Amino acid sequence: MSFPPIHLHDTRRRAVVPFEPLEPGKVGIYSCGPTVYAPQTLGNMRSQLMPDLLRRVLLAAGYDVTYVTNITDVGHLTSDADAGDDKVEAAAARAGQTVAEITGHFTEQWATDRRRLGCLEPDIRPAASEHIAEQIAMVQTLEAQGHTYVIDDGVYFDVSTFPRYAEFAGLDLDELEATGRIDNLEAKRHPADFALWKLSPPGVTRLQEWDSPWGRGFPGWHIECSAMATRYLGDRFDIHTGGVDHIRVHHTNEVAQSECALGVHPWVSIWMHNEFLDLSGRKMSKSAGDVLVVDTLVDAGIEPLAFRYFFLQAHYRQQQEFTIDGVRAAGVALRRLVGHAVAARDEVGGRVDGGDPARTEPFREAFWAALADDLDAPKALAVASTVARSADLTAADRWSLLADFDRALAFGLADATGVDAAEVGGDDVGPEAQALLDERNAARAAKDWGRADELRDQLVAMGFDVVDTPEGPKLRRR
Ligand SMILES: [Zn+2]
């Protein structure tokens, strides 16, 4: 199978466009990473799962992928309007801990939860506090080009010097001018102007601050991503991802400062944004006690990978309504898929090249074509599910396909352990199948092997395998 052409939705062009890498065969991806001052919620993890799926599809397509996601450990203020405290600094003060303790703890939680959700490790994971020199250099470049001005509390980007500023997010700057909250920053020339470097207030020593040409202080949040993406992916790169909440401010500002400092357009070929997890009133504020994290699922008896399955059930550009029951149901469906895959795998001794292409290739093409079409995960998952239960495919066919699909699904099918047949069949085998199974058990007890085999064949024709378990024969739906 030649891999289908990949099309992705680009926020900047507001369209699904063909993916064309800047350098043939290679892809650079940058994802805005966590601000490590609080637990990363399941909503945040959707912004991890989307680029992980993207990366896996590009790897399956044969690209050499470099995946960079950062750690924001300084500079992200509690308000997007450049006011308020630094989130990390405030959290450290609240907890009576050092900045290193806070950032270390929440970085670890994020990294652990990524792994539990089946995400590949980032190729590069830069921390903002370790790239101060690159950020200062970029601000100096912008200053030399006349894009900045200095006021009491810092160095600001002057959006009037970048005529394309409003284009990226389709902003109405006049409206912003009229309604913008300027807070304590009346010295800003336009409400959309944003901090590149914040100065420490006179007489105040902050927990994190550095010397700069403008005085002691710390970088603005937006410049961090521009500087780190450029450091590791070059002046232009292929794909930048993030949550939709970043489009209007954070990514608009990243584009402005990067295109000015680097003299490029477009800075990034494709911008991909995932929609929110819809909590329908369930509060997911990080300051609230009931923070919804991976451990919330585990405490409810749900395995973490159920959330990955749940994520794949909706397109990344759709809001997805979160309920515990929805994730629980995804977990049941996942277990069923794993059960079928393990049975097929074990039946063929793990051989992945045993299928008959005449039967397998249409499914293989349908699966990868769905993902190549702007990551249509629900469609791909439906193909996987059909394959797993198909009575028209042999075990060799099924395992050849499911092992291949798992490069994107990441359910760990190659190493998954056998599943209790009762768990797989559950109570939903139906009265007719159950009656046949009971009759077969009776025939076996009577040593009527011919009749027992006949009944087994009938069950197979109905789409069931008969599996021997310690509690006796059980049915497993294909
Ligand atoms: Zn960012």
Image: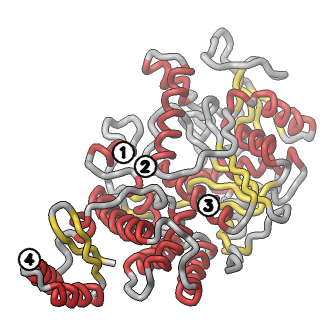
Ligand 1 closer than 8 Å to label 2 CB = no
Looking at the picture, tell me which residue is in the foreground, 213 or 56.
Answer: 56
Circles 2 and 4: CB atoms closer than 8 Å: no
Q: Is residue 189 above or below residue 277?
A: above
Dot 1: element:
loop
Circles 2 and 1: CB atoms closer than 8 Å: yes
Q: Which residue, given by chain and number where applicable, does mark 1 sit on?
A: 292
Q: Which residue, given by chain and number where applicable, does mark 3 sit on?
A: 56
Looking at the picture, tell me which residue is in the foreground, 120 or 191.
Answer: 120
Q: Is residue 124 visible?
A: yes
Circles 3 and 2: CB atoms closer than 8 Å: no
Q: Residue at x 80, y 21 (%)?
A: 212
Q: Residue at x 36, y 45 (%)?
A: 292
Q: Is residue 166 visible?
A: no
In the rendered image, residue 154, in percent from the top left (x then y), is placed at 73, 27
**Mark 1 surroundings within 10 Å by alpha-carbon count, few (fewer than 14), some (14 through 19), many (20 or more):** many
Report the amino acid beneath label 4: Ala
Indicate the quadrant containing the N terminus: top left, top right, bottom left or bottom right: bottom right
Dot 3: element:
helix
Q: Which residue, given by chain and number where applicable, does mark 2 sit on?
A: 42
**Mark 4 surroundings within 10 Å by alpha-carbon count, few (fewer than 14), some (14 through 19), many (20 or more):** few
Q: Residue at x 14, y 82 (%)?
A: 440
